[in-house]
Amino acid sequence: MKCLVINLDRSVDRLAAVKSEFSRIGVAFERVAGVDVKEGLPFEAPPLTATEVCCFLSHRLCWKIIADGPDEFGAVFEDDVVFSQDAGSMLADSSWIPPNADIIKLETFFNRVRLGSQHFAVAGAYSARLLLGQHLGACGYVVSKKAAQKLFNSTERPKVAVDVALFSPNQMTAARNTIYQLTPALCMQAHFLGGKMPQSLVQVAPRVHVNKRMIDRCRAEVARVFWYFHNRPFFQAAEKVDAVRLGGSNV
């Protein structure tokens, strides 16, 4: 399974940091040059900020690589990722991935999240649970070749931030995929370690509200609900988890 890391050409400090992180867990990665807002915005996509558009396009580059590649799954990371101590063995082998998985979220944001109550043992102390609620962040995830192609085809003009598109059940791009959360998580963003916060590809900023016709909203919601339940067992029990912890030790 190929590991792709999004990194801006000007972010040499972040590249050095992520090289050290991957070296620590003994895994190779392929750098993907991120779309840099300072080199010009390809197009505007209100209500997204310019940085959010470029971040989304950077992830689309990774989806295209995975969709066109030979492997059934690929992993995507942003360059501020910090791994658990035993992440290397999980990333070196994709045989643990549930066969029906479209996306597996490897990251934790340490917030309350709704997961399926059934634990699917995957490797060691790790298990996969259906992600039934919103769990944002796009610093680390696995995506199937098929799902990567679908994501790439349906997001030429993004309408929401990339982590919302991937991990919010309110979005069609997430609702129509079978998404698992790895528990405990395999990675987190570096700013959770404290100290100086590294520059992130995603900058949260106030967004302009865009009105839609009621009929369009209704159609979109009906389609989203259909695909959400199509890809999830109807009687799947769920539970609220206060926070998905990070596996092992991260440093």
Image (cartoon, rainbow, N blue to C red):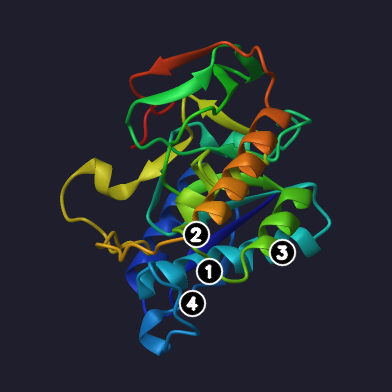
Residue at x 54%, y 70% (from the top left corner):
57
Residue 8: x, y in percent?
Answer: 43, 74
Residue 84: x, y in percent?
Answer: 43, 34
Q: Which mark is residue 35?
A: 4
Q: Secondary structure at mark 3?
A: helix
Residue 61: x, y in percent?
Answer: 62, 69
Determine whether label 1 and label 4 are within 8 Å by CB: yes
Residue at x 44%, y 33% (from the top left corner):
85
Q: Which residue is mark 2?
A: 213
For the residues marked 1 and 4, what is the alpha-carbon distance in whole angstroms?
A: 5 Å
Q: Nearer the viewer, mark 2 or mark 3?
A: 2
Q: Which mark is residue 153?
A: 3
Residue farthest along the left direction in this orientation: 195
Q: Which residue is mark 1?
A: 58
Q: Callout 2, which amino acid?
A: Arg
Q: Secondary structure at mark 2?
A: loop
Q: Secondary structure at mark 4?
A: loop
Quarter where residue 234 is shown: top right
Of mark 3 and mark 4, the one earlier in the sequence is 4
Residue 181: x, y in percent?
Answer: 54, 30
Q: In the picture provided, is 103 more to the left or to the right than 109?
A: right
Residue at x 67%, y 57% (from the top left corner):
151
Q: Nearer the viewer, mark 3 or mark 4?
A: 3
Which residue is at the front of the view, 40 or 72? 40
Of mark 2 and mark 3, the one earlier in the sequence is 3
Q: Nearer the viewer, mark 1 or mark 2?
A: 2
Q: Is residue 112 above or below residue 74?
A: above
Q: Secondary structure at mark 1?
A: helix
Q: Is residue 25 above or below residue 112?
A: below
